[in-house]
Amino acid sequence: MSVLPELEALVDAALRDAELVYEHPAPGRFLVDLPGTNKLKTVCGLVLGEHGLRIEAFVCRQPDENREQLWTWLLQHNARMYGVSYSIDTAGDVYLTGRLSAAAVTAEEIDRLLGAVLSYADDHFNTMLEIGFGTSIRREWAWRVKRGVPAQPRGLRGLRRARVTEAAPPGYRRRWWVLTTMIVCLLVVIMGNTVLNVALPTLQRDLSATQSQLQWAIDAYILVFAGLLFSWGVIGDRIGRRRALLIGLGIFSLGSVLAAFSGSAQELIAWRALMGVGGAAVQPATLAVISNVFPAGERSRAIGIWAGAAGIGIAGGPLAGGLVLEHFWWGAVFLLGIPVAAVGAVGCVTLVPESRDPAPGRLDVPGVLLSIAGLGSLVFGIIRGGEGVGWTTPGVLVPLLGGVVLLVAFVWWQRRTTHPALDVSLFRLPAFSASAAALALNFFALQGATFYLVYYLQGVLGFSPLQSGATLVPMAVAIALASPRASVLADRFGAKLVCAAGFGLMASAFAANQLLDTDPPIWLVLVVLFVQGLGLGAVLAPATESIMSVVPREKAGAGGAVNNTVRQVGGALGVAILGSLVAGVYAARLGDAVDVLPADAREQARQSVVATLEAVRLAGAGAQGLVDPARQAFVEAMHVTAVGTAASAVVAAVVCLVWLPGRRRP
C-alpha cells in the first residue's frame, strides 16, 4: 500500500493542532485516543492509502435493536463519507468503518469525523458506566488496554470514585434541590396557563367576551410561546440557562400582573401574549438544567419526576383558580403564580449552577428568525382554522402554508450553515423524531380534551369553577404517579412498549366519554379522568427522556426547546381542531332550538353551551326550555369529538410501536 505523504502530513498536523494523544506506529497508520467524559478513551484508527482515508472505531457495546442508526448517524454528520459499514462481534460490540476520498481529507473534515465518533461512542459507553454494568466495564477496559491504551493509575475503583468527584457535573451534590427548584419554575408556567381554563365561563360573562376571544385568550399564549421556544432555548445555551430562567420568570410575572387588571378581552389577550414570552424562556431552561446536572444514569428518573410534577400543575391551576373565583374577582387567578415565581427565583440564585454551551460559535440569526416566523405563522394558521372560519379560506391557508415553507427554509439553512442553531439531522434518529411525534399527539389529545371537558363540567353538569378544578385532581394525581414509574419501566421494557401502552390507556379513557351523559355518576367521571392521567403520564417521561438522551449537554437548551415546541404545536392543533369540531357539532345539534331567544342573541348562543345558558339567563323565563336541549346537544358533540380524540391516541400508539426504539439489550 502506497502512502500519500501530503495526506500523512495533513493528518499529523490536524491531530497535533487538536492536541489529541495519538500514536504513529507505522507509515500511513495513526491510533488516536479520543478523551471520554469519564476518564476513558475511545480508540480510533486512521489508515491512509492511495484511495484516501479509512476510519476504524469502536462505537458501541450492546446496542439497542435499531443498529442501523450506528452507520446512518455518521453519514448524517459527515456527508462526504462513503463505504460506511459496521460489524458486531460475538460479545455484541459494534465496530464501524468509513472512508473519505483523498480530495475530501481536510483538517476540518477530520475534526468533524473524530467528533462524531467520540460523541456516539462516549455517549453510549458512559451511559453504561454511570448505570454501573461492572462486567461490561471490565470487558471494555480490557479491550482498550489490549489496543495500547495505558491503564489509569487508579484503576476501575478509582474511576468509579471519580464519577462523583472529578467527573461529576456542576451542582451534582445538590442535584435533587436543583430538581426541586426546576419543578417550582415549571409549576409557575403550567399553573399560570391552566388556571385560565376554569375562568373561561366567568370571563365570558364579566368581559362580555365572544367564543373567539376566549379561544384567543388561550391561543395568544400558545402562539407566542411556541414561536419563541426554540429561540429562547438557543439564547439560554449562549447566555446561561439560569440567567434565562430569571429573565423568563420576571417577564411571566409582569405579564400575569397586567393580565389580572385587564379591562377588556383585547387587553387580556395582549398580556397573555407577554406571559408567553416569559414562559418560553422558562420551560426549556428547566429541562436543560436537569440534563446538565444529572448524569445519564439518573437523568431518566429526574425527568420522570419533572414530568410528573406537570400533573400537579395541570390540576393545581384549575383547583387553585376555582378556589380563588369562589371569593375574588377573575383577575386574582393570574396573581397566584407571583409568590411561586419569587420562590423559584430565589432557588435559581442560591442553588442552581450556571451552565451554557462552552463553545457556542456565532449566533445563527437567520435560523432563529426563520424559526420564529415559521412556528408563529404555522400556529397562527392552526388557531385561525379552529375559529370556524374555514380551513380552506385564505386567512387560514396563507399562514399555514407560509409557516410550512418557512420551516422548510429553516431546515435547508440549518443543513448548510457552518454554525446551525439546531442539528436537524437528529430528526433522522427514531429516538428523537418518533418521540417528538408522540409528544405532539399526546398534547393534541390533552389540550383538545381539556378544552371541551371544562365546558362539560360547568355547562352541562353545572359545576362551579372550584368543583371543576377538584374534578381534575384524579387526572393530575395519575400523571404524578405514572410519570416517574414510566421512566423505570422504559429502562426495563423500552420506550416503545411503555408509550404505546400509555396511548392505549388514553384511547380507552376517551372512548369511555361515550358513557358520560347529562347526569352521570361522579365516580364514573373521576375514573375516566384517572385512566386518562395514567396514559398521559406513561407517555410524558419516556418520550421526553428519549429526546434529551440524543441531544449533547451543551445543546440541552435547544433540545428542551424542541421538546416543548412539539408539545405546543400539538396542543394548538388539539384546541383548534377538536375545539372547532365540538363547536360545529354543537351548533348543528342545537339547530333551531335557539329561536326562542332574541334574534340578536342567537348567533352568540350557538358558540358554546355556556354561551347558550348565559343567553337563556338574560332572556328570562320564556327561554328556560332551551336549557335541557342545549346540554344534550353538547353531550352529543362531546361524544363525537371524543371519537376523534381516541382515534388520535390509537394513531400515536401505532407510531410508537413502529418507530420508537425498543428495549436496550443488557
Image (tube, rainbow, N blue to C red):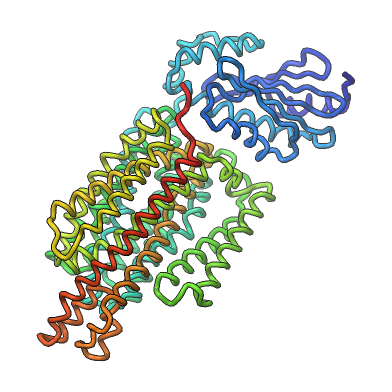
Looking at the image, residue 49 lies above or below residue 75 = above
Q: Position of residue 367 (x, y in %)?
A: 60, 56
Q: Which corner quadrant holds the N terminus? A: top right
The answer to whether residue 264 of the structure is visible from this angle is: no
Residue at 69%, 35% (x, y): give it.
112
Looking at the image, residue 665 lies above or below residue 550 = above
Front in this rendered view, residue 163 or 371: 371
Looking at the image, residue 139 lies above or below residue 642 = above
Front in this rendered view, residue 29 or 178: 29
Is residue 550 rendered to the left or right of residue 493?
right
Farthest residue to the left: give it.
621
Is residue 506 rendered to the left or right of residue 296?
left
The quarter holding residue 358 reads top right
Farthest residue to the bottom: give it.
599
Residue at 19%, 78% (x, y): give it.
614
The quarter holding residue 132 reads top left
Residue at 61%, 13% (x, y): give it.
144
Q: Position of residue 520 (x, y in %)?
A: 14, 59
Is residue 574 rendered to the left or right of residue 29?
left
Looking at the image, residue 317 lies above or below residue 491 = below
The answer to whether residue 561 of the structure is visible from this angle is: yes
